[in-house]
Amino acid sequence: MEGLIHQIISGIATGGIYASVSLALVMIYQATHHINFAQGEMATFSTYITLTFINLGMPYWAAFFLAVAVSFCIGVTIERILIRPMANAPILSAVGVFVGLLLIINSLSGWFFDYTIKQFPSPFPDEALFGGYISGHQLGSTGVTLAVLTAVYLFFRHTSLGLAMRAAALNPVSARLVGVRVGWMLALGWGLAAAIGSVAGCMVAPVVFLDPNMMAGILLYSFAGALLGGIDSPLGAVLGGFAVGVIENLGGAYIVGTELKLTLALVIIVSVLTVRPSGLLGRTVQSRV
Amino acid sequence: MPALLEAKGLHAAYGETKVLHGIDFSVEEGGVTALLGANGAGKTTTLRAICGMVRTQGELLLGGEAIGGMATEDIVRRGVAHVPDGRGTFMELTVEENMRLGAYIRRDREVEADFDRMFGYFPRLKERFRQQSGTLSGGEQQMLAITRALLLRPRLLLLDEPSFGLAPLIVKEIFNIMRRIRDEEKVSILLVEQNASIALAFAEDAYLLETGRIVVSGKAADISKDESIRRSYLGY
């Protein structure tokens, strides 16, 4: 029983990472109807940026926030330069660009920061808390993840810019007609997604260690989470991300063993796509004519 | 006084398909101008051309400033509000969010007061304020679309077939309110309609469009009295 509770708690902690990346995927999906396959590699690159700042002697949180800001700018730049010209391209060309972006950023990470596996510091205390159920890092990273998710929620619900970004994603033609600069809203969306990825990368790196392929598996779990919750529902994606974290941990501990954990993500993806393609909280728009 | 909007030799095309073949028209300050014609005459395209939503050639002047070739957002920010065909409602958002988007470009503090003024015209929107707008009836969505456009505080309001798909009683209600809006708001209106009799009763000036060319123009009152025009173009 103790083991089970422990597995669930650490499942929630990793689930928080998946939830953030799922949210980043959904944000870009809603705006462009494409899955950003490079989301994970962007997050890895951001984590390297954070590590570089730390190695330069910056305090952890200064490096963390500076890297978030830099990642935001990188996200905006990628949208402006690479994604925007693809706005009306056929779907396969767009997929090609996303895969290319994945390979390019992955190689850049290796080129700039080399391929050796690196340790990444955690800003949280190392000891186990609450009678050994949860580590300091797990508690801290879950807290950070929840803070990010709450901030994103408040931004989209309660600010005029957040509303404009939703409008641009839902109905670009109408958004232009109320004066929203739709192109910039998409770029901002990319920036936000990159910033969220940066946080997720820094929170997961102390656990899995930093190398250029760090996010490959995490992206798969997050994609499973996004699909499970509904690829066009931000709330669904977040819940799906947490659910996948718990499923992964329990499945790994009691059913398939750690070697086959990643298979669970694929099983979830295939099951959702065959049984309920819109996901648990997928969009159901009621409309009367 | 110069016209608020002036088009000279306006051409518009979707790719290779030309829809407008050099039309001239103007919208007077503070007036209502109607653009009539059958399906496919180019009425909706004319409104899209004004908003920079299709490729155009020729001259388009808003208060003397050339707006041809500008991005839609920039034309909107110069005070042109467009109620498009299909109404352009953000179905997934609430009535409130739709209204906030209408006032998105404004930085003044009178938005809340304007909400109340809009509820004066359309009390039903107040009842539905927190509701998802996809659940509104067709008439209510048209009211929401007009409200969203007015919240921009536009100089020029473009209305594309506000009567489309609505029951005659609702159409009458909406046009009665439009009369109040015309008298109380400082806005000039360019109205596109297939329902010629309603439009001519509402407008001061009118243009009749046929396959991308203007065939008749004049005072709305004169056109509605001219039996030959009515028979050959307006069909009533």
Image (tube, coloured by chain):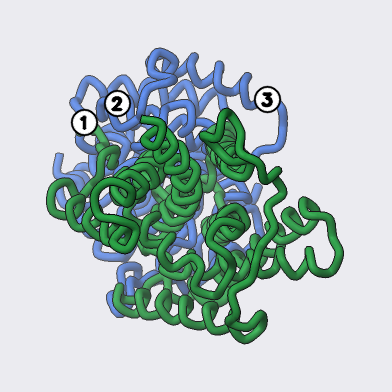
Chain colours: A green, B blue
Please say whether residue A216 is visible from this viewpoint: yes
Residue B223 in sight here: no
Say which residue label 1 marks.
A288
Q: Residues within 10 Å of mark 2 (few under 14, many from 20)?
A: many
| Up-down relation of residue A34 to residue A169 (above or below) | below
Residue placed under numbered mark 2 in the picture: B136
Q: Chain of mark 1?
A: A
| Identity, as a three-letter code, of the amino acid under mark 3 | Glu
Q: Position of residue A263 (x, y in %)?
A: 26, 61
Residue B180 in the image: state x and y as whole percent.
47, 21
Residue occupying the point 46% across, 34% down: B98
* Residue B209, above or below B138: below
Residue at x 21%, y 56% (from the top left corner): A267
The image quadrant of residue B179 is top left
Front one among A44 and B92: A44
Give residue B66's quadrant in the image.
Answer: bottom right
Image marks 1 and 2: residues in contact by CB distance under 8 Å: yes
